[in-house]
Image (cartoon, coloured by chain):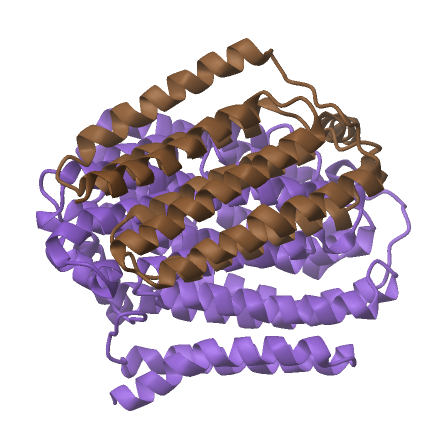
Amino acid sequence: MNSLAFDIAHALAGSMVVLSFLLLYQDRVYALLNVFALHSLALALAVGWQAYLQEAHHLYVTAVVALLFKAIVIPTALHRIVRQLDIHRTLEVVGGVGRDMLAGAALVALAIMVMLPVTEGSNPLARQDLAFALAVILLGLLLMVNRHNAISLVIGFMSLENGLVLAAAGALGMPLVVEISVAFSVLIALIVIGVFLFRIRERFDSVDMQAMDTFREGRRK
Amino acid sequence: MSALGALAMTLLLAVPASVGLGLVRLSDYRRGARLSIAATLISLLSAITLIWARPETNLYLQVDDFNIYLIVLNNFVSFTTSLFSASYIAHELETGKLTPKYLRFYHAMYQALVFAMNLGLLANNIGLLWVAIELATLVTVLMVGLYRTPAALEAAWKYFILGSLGIALALFGTILIYLAAQPVMGQGLPAMAWDRLLVHAAKFDPALLNLAFVFLLLGYGTKAGLVPLHAWLPDAHAEGPTPISAVLSGLLLNVALYAILRFKMLMSANPSALAPGPLMIMLGLLSLLFAGLMLYRRGDIKRLFAYSSIEHMGIMSFAFGMGGPLANFAGLLHMTMHSLTKSAIFFAVGHISQVKGTQRISTIRGLTATHPLLGWGLVAGVIAIAGMPPFGVFMSEFLVVSSTFARQPWLALPLVIGLLLAFGTLLWRLHGLAFGVPDNAPTVAIQASIWPMLIHLGLVLLAGLWLPGPLVAWFHHVAVWLG
């Protein structure tokens, strides 16, 4: 394989991991949304590049879906929701940024140590992509675990899902990738509509998930 | 014959899908309920046709010895639940808990759920299987939040987040399976078709398969309600409409477990891959013991039986993890018996909570005196689910325990402890519910549909007393195939 093409694929997938790290320490809602939009843009580019390299034209669809839907529509919608519901503009980071960064670095190391040995026989491009994808997935999980507000939870889940699409695109010739990425987009759209329609703020006075927990404790007593 | 089979298979998918779409536009809810019943009846008949007329397996769908019984069970319980829904939901409308608009939505979503579960069971393509389970999750999330109370919305949200997480992990596992298959089978659709994967599984890279299975077990395990990823299950069962609790427990958990078993078969076909058994045994025992302990302090009647579902999923996972003809036989039987019994219990519980106007166990007392039919129905159901003879659950649990004693006596100890814990708690709770001194709280008169419950319990009783020879032979055949 052309080494430049390989390097570009590598850089694009790697930039997703870096952006996942950026997501981890955002303490303002709008900044978080903007970084997520960049994350999705990087995904769209990475998938588009894969489509070009593999000459798999259906992957262009996935790239366009990622670009339009996740880099533009969803962040805009979330911006509006945040404005309309007047959600707290700052986000608490549980346990501090330093700890998150260390945990994140450990997870990336884990992803590489797990994926590289088991994929020794595979195509080198797929190998790198999978290791990066697993890292993005684990960082998304970390974000979901460490934040207690609905918006961060949604962003965490969506970044995790970006990792999955990267993995699917990296798997050479995998069928149904387009269908799966569309199915996932529906899921995400529903989550976002859920945040809005369920009026989590209206019901619980904040999007803080801990408020929900207190509410539940109260009911059980 | 295969043309008839192909027709039946098409009907199984097309009927719920088209009726579901049609129901969205139908404003008369009584006709909607009747249409929903008719649609599930057609699906049930098509499912029964499939027993004799097998369609040819293609790259997307298949009917084989293993999934056929789940397809029949699935459509049978969907049918009885749609009967139950009709009376249950009509009452919710009278009390003003639901509006006709939501009702329309309810029946449409119910058909969508039946479609998703049928698609999952019929799927031969592991990507399609994943899409079906994702669709089922989406639909049930919407149904759980149907009442729009804060508690229902919270339950739906929690289910949403945990369910999507499970689904995400399962997708990663699915991608890894494809990656393992791709060097051997080449690119494209055949490398995702389960029956072809099984043929070539021995040549796959074992390390990739191992990793894939861990993700798949955790992912679909979340949907099957296995501890430690069970947190959504009690809330979703307690806050959603009761017919949905019945379908969730009786059917959707089975579909998720079925997905795990399909992948377990792939693992077993590769001699150098990790043995999937111990992982499943561990998760199973953990679920069983945890649910056994949690049952003790439940104050909400639907939550109580939701934990009981976790317990039983644990038993099944344990049985399939043990493997071998006898334990697999017990697992398959238990899957069937649990579906029938647990949905019967939810039918009873649904009407009971409507009669009493509450789900709190402490305020529901002396049901056999005040509502004999519902009360004794619940008694029979709980005795069955606790694993007492002469019901079918006793037989399957007895088989699990005896096969464990024969092969791994030390594993039988935690198993028996878990079973006894659940048994004791359920009977203790039942005593107050059924035979306590009734309080004079006002009750609501309802038009209960008793038949679905009676039919289910009758079948479970029949299975406990006598299993038809062909059924036993067939269960045995599948048990051997599962390995």
Hue used for the chain lettered A:
brown
* Above or below A70: residue B119: below
| Residue drawn at x 24%, y 60% as measured from the top left | B194
* Above or below B330: residue B162: above
Q: Is residue B403 left or right of residue B254?
A: left
Q: Is residue B434 visible?
A: no
Question: Where residue B238 appears, x then y in whole percent?
Answer: 67, 45
Which of these two is toward me, A107 or B97? A107
Question: Where residue A212 appears, x then y in whole percent?
Answer: 74, 31
Residue at the far front in the pictured view: A4
| Residue drawn at x 32%, y 50% as measured from the top left | A50
Q: In this view, does B81 lie to the left or right of B477?
A: right
Q: In which quarter of the image is residue B258?
A: bottom left
* Above or below B18: residue A15: above
Hue used for the chain lettered B:
purple
Q: Quadrant of residue B403?
A: top left
Question: Where residue B332 appears, x then y in whole percent?
Answer: 32, 55
| Residue drawn at x 26%, y 55% as measured from the top left | A54
Q: Can residue B371 be seen in this view?
A: yes
| Residue drawn at x 50%, y 32% as measured from the top left | A140
Q: In this view, does B384 lie to the left or right of A60?
A: right
Which of these two is toward me, A45 or B454? A45
Q: In which quarter of the image is residue B161?
A: top right
Question: Where residue B237 appears, x then y in whole percent?
Answer: 63, 47
On-image quarter of the C terminus of chain A:
top right
On-image quarter of the N terminus of chain A:
top left
